Structure formats: structure tokens, C-alpha cells
Image (cartoon, helix red, strand yellow):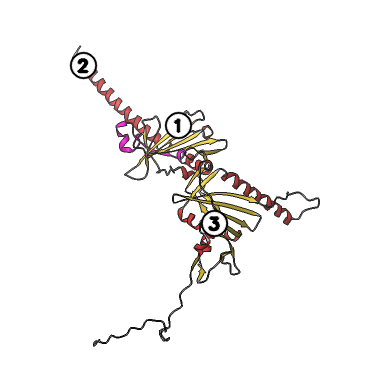
Amino acid sequence: MSNKALIILGVLAAVMVVWAVAQSRVSSEQAAVAAANAPLVPGLDTEAIGSISLKSGATTVTLAREGGKFVIGEKSNYPALNSKVNKLITTVLDLKTAELVTKDKANFADLGVSDDKAKTIVTFYKPDKSVLTGVVIGGNSQQGRGTYVKLLGSDDVFLTTESPWLETGALDYVEKNLVELQRNDVASIAVKTAGGAYTLVKDVNDKIVANGIEVPAQKKLKSDVADQVFGAAVSMSFEDVIPAALAKYDFNRSMTIKMKDPTVYTVDVADANGKYYVKVSADYTDKAAVTKENSVETPEQLKAKEAKLLARDKADNFTKKHAGWVYEIPEYKGKELAKSPAEFLEDLPKPAVDANSPADANSAVPVASDANE
């Protein structure tokens, strides 16, 4: 081969190298442009979701679809709040990529997207338990906002435009408010304990007082205990939930909360090993049927009937929701609900001694000793 041919081949080879480098750079730039502000999980069919798994460290939460709602597997299929589940799904779908960071698995651990280093792994399953899609959420960027993420089964690690916040505890997905009543709507609260019974009502000055407590001589009722017990009864949240069939506790205290309408709430209280548990239910005591009158009804009559139906449904739904469940409540709240009549009492203050009054004849009077004796 002539020198001229060799020179031509050399030039062509150099051109091909330059072209390949240029193409690689263009491809990288195109990939970066494509990754900018693009959804990480495009086109997810939310109706195809059968369950969702959230894994954070050693904790796993399973949200399984049952009909039109989700339940929490780790809490014996206690109902989850649909609004909370929808927020989780929306947060994942709203993840947008700012840039492609790496495809090298050697970098996964440092970025927090390896299986053992991930902050959270969210997996969406089909009803047949096969994987629909999933997201691995890693550490936050040290250069600014954004979090390292990748899809399950993919080696492409992206930086997001915003750092997501996901709730990863089982009880993060439930309605923790157990009882939430307006104080002014409560007529009375009848309390039964092993140490006796009493009733909490409002006096003429709109102050909560305890009726039915016998006050012995030299004792008086504490000024604030009645209001504390009343407040604990009308506003109650829980810290854990267990099936009633597994709760072998002695519910030996009860509170009957009568509202100003015919609704009555019942709270049964137990304690075991320093923890407090409650069972709750409600009943609308006016059982008369709501019927349409033959005559034309006034707006006030229609409004009253509507209010009655709504209140009855509210009580029925409350009981259905909580039937079969026992709730662990905060210790400080349980102690208030468990107060017996004796805990309402305190000693009367002792009368002040007048320094100018004559000494008590029975008081001991020191006598100076005779030094000569």
C-alpha cells in the first residue's frame, strides 16, 4: 500500500474518532435535556394498583386495596385514610428529574439508591402481586435542592427538581383522632370506676363540676380535676390499634357522653402494664322513624329532619368504623379517664395560727432547770 493511501486511511480514522466522540457528546446532551423536568414515573395507571409497599430501613408498611379503600397490613388490615394514600401516590407521580447523574452501580451506595442504603423504596403492585413499578429514593444533594432517585430495575440515577417527603409509618396513614367533640355540644358525662361514680356537668357559671362525689369532713373538691377529665373525654387520639379479639383486658371503667341532641357516646377504659386502652361506640337514642308529613312541611321542619338523619348516620358510621377494634391511648390521657372520685378530693387548708392568741393550755411550756438541783 502506498504512503498516500496510508495517509488517507489515517485521516479517515481520525475523522471517525472525532465523529464518534461528537456523537457521544450529542447523545449525552440529548439524554440530559430529556431528563430535565421530566416525570420519573410517567403514565402510571393508578386504577391498576393492587397494593403499595413502603420500605424504610427495617420498617415496612403495606397498603392493600380492598374495594374502594386501602387497609394497612401491618395493623391487621385497619382502614387507611384514602386521602393519605392518594397523597403518597401523588407525591411519587410528581417526582420530576432535573438531570441524569450516573448509570454506574458503583456509585449507588454513595448516592443512597442501593437496596441497603436507600432512604425509602416505594413499590406498586398489581392485584396479582406482580410489580407494576417502583421508586428508590436516596439521599439529598449536597449542592442544592433535590434528591437522588431511580426506578426499580433501572440503573439510571436522577437528581429530582424537589426533595420529596414521604410518610413511612403505618399509623401515618390512619385517622388518629378517635373522639373529637365540641365542648358546648356535650350535656353531661357519666363516669363509672371501681372506686365509685360521678357525673360531669356545667354549673350556672359554665364551669365543669363533678356531681355525685361524697366529700368527707376536712376535705374539698379540687378546682380543676373535673375540667381535666371532661377535656380528656371529648378530645381523644390513639397511639396504636389492635383487634378486639386479641385485647384481653379488663374494661372496668366507662364514660357515657350525652350530647345535647339524642347522640350518646360510650368509652370503655382498661389499663394493663402501664398502658391504657379504650373501646368506643355511639348510639342515636331517638329511634322514631323520619317520615314525610301529608301536609306541606316548613323549611324548619325539613331542616330538623335532615339534622336528625345526619346525626343518626354519624353515630351509626362511628360505631361501624370502630367495632372490633381496641385503641391504645396516650398514658397522660388514660390517667385522666381513669380518675376515681377519691382523686377529686384534697385536704382543706389548716386554719392559720394567730401569733397574738394565748398559748394553748395543753401546750408544753419549757421550764428552766435549777442549776443548784
Is 353 in front, or is 264? 353
- The kind of residue tagged 1 is Thr
**136 on left or right of 241:** left
Question: Quick check: 352 above or below 263?
Answer: below
Please tell me how crowded label 1 is: few (under 14), some (14-19), or many (20+) other residues with Cα within 10 Å.
Answer: some
CA distance separating discs 3 and 1 = 54 Å
Amino acid under disc 3? Thr
Residue at 36% from the left image edge and 45% from the top image edge: 145
Q: Quadrant of residue 10?
A: top left
Q: Is residue 110 magenta?
A: yes
Q: Residues within 10 Å of mark 3 (few under 14, many from 20)?
A: some
Q: Are marks 2 and 1 in contact (CB under 8 Å)?
A: no
Please state which of the two labelled residues, at mark 2 or mark 1, is closer to the viewer: 1
In contact (CB < 8 Å): disc 3 and disc 1:
no
Residue 189 on image: x %, y %:
59, 58
Quadrant of the image containing the N terminus: top left
Three-letter code, disc 2 = Leu
> Where does label 3 land, which residue?
193
Of tags 2 and 3, which is closer to the observer?
Answer: 3
Who is closer to the viewer here, 145 or 9? 145
First reached walking from the N terminus: tag 2 or tag 3: 2
Q: Is residue 2 above or below residue 225?
A: above
In space, the residues marked 2 and 3 are separated at their CA atoms by 105 Å
Residue that numbered label 2 is attached to: 6
Q: Which residue is mark 1?
A: 133
Of labels 2 and 1, earlier in sequence is 2
Residue 262 against residue 25 in the figure, above or below: below
Q: Outermost residue, right direction?
A: 294
Which range is magenta? 91-119
Is residue 161 or residue 128 the one in the foreground? 128
The tag earlier along the polypeptide, 3 or 1, is 1
Q: Secondary structure at mark 3?
A: strand
